[in-house]
Image (tube, rainbow, N blue to C red):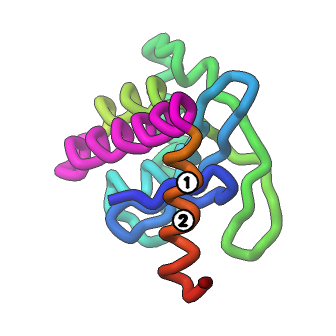
């Protein structure tokens, strides 16, 4: 389901892009909450997904949800090619977010998130996996 490239800032879930940033210091992936919300709510329009996220964030804050209170922002590239401050969450926060949105995509998203994390952990413990993956990707792109 995913093509994990640490140098890339996009990760695919069922052909939908999720903007992401790997933080070497914390050893965590940070995912765009708006992108996750768009997938879970099956919204093709980024503005609608952003409005949904803002309303959900407000409701969760009122409920005392700490994962929303501790939400970070990173500059991520938007569709127009410019970078904007974007709400991001780590895997644990995304899993909590998934619980707050009724969606038939919830379970596949949880499995995808686990796979993304597992791939990165595997590559950290065995750097050869990262090299092998890069070679395979290069060959798929037509490199010798």
| Residue 30 in the figure: left or right of residue 44 | right
Q: Nearer the viewer, residue 42 or 51?
A: 42
Give the prevailing secondary structure in the magenta stretch.
helix
Does 34 appear in magenta?
no
At x 48% / y 80%, what residue is drawn? 140
Quarter of the image with the N terminus in it: bottom left
The Cα–Cα distance between marks 2 and 1, rounded to whole angstroms, is 6 Å
Point 47% across, 26% down: residue: 93
Residue stretch rendered in magenta on the structure: 102-126
Residue 79 sits above or below residue 133 on the image: below
Please name the residue shown 43% across and 71% down the image: 44
- Residue 60, image x and y in percent? 46, 24
Location of residue 100 by image quarter: top left
Q: Which mark is residue 50?
A: 1
- Residue 71 rendering spot, x and y as whole percentages: 63, 27
Q: Is residue 11 left or right of residue 105?
A: right
Picture quarter with the C terminus:
bottom right
Which element is circle 1 on? helix
Q: Residues within 10 Å of mark 2 (few under 14, many from 20)?
A: some
Label 2 close to label 1 by CB (< 8 Å): yes
Depth order, front residue of 114/101: 114
In the picture, the disc for residue 17 is none
Magenta span includes 123: yes
Residue 96 pos. (x, y %): 38, 26
Q: Is residue 113 left or right of residue 85?
A: left
């Amino acid at each position: 389901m995913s093509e994990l490239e640490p140098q890339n800032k996009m990760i695919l879930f069922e052909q939908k892009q999720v903007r992401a940033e790997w933080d070497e210091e914390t050893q965590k992936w940070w995912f765009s909450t708006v992108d996750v919300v768009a997938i879970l709510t099956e919204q093709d329009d980024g503005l609608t997904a952003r409005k949904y996220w803002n309303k959900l964030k407000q409701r969760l804050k009122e409920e005392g949800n700490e994962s929303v209170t501790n939400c970070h922002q990173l500059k991520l590239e938007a569709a127009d090619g410019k970078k904007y401050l974007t709400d991001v969450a780590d895997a644990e926060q995304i899993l909590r977010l998934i619980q707050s949105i009724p969606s038939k995509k919830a379970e596949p998203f949880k499995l995808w998130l686990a796979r993304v994390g597992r791939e990165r952990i595997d590559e950290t413990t065995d750097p050869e996996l990262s090299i092998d993956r890069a070679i395979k990707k290069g060959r798929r792109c037509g490199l010798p």
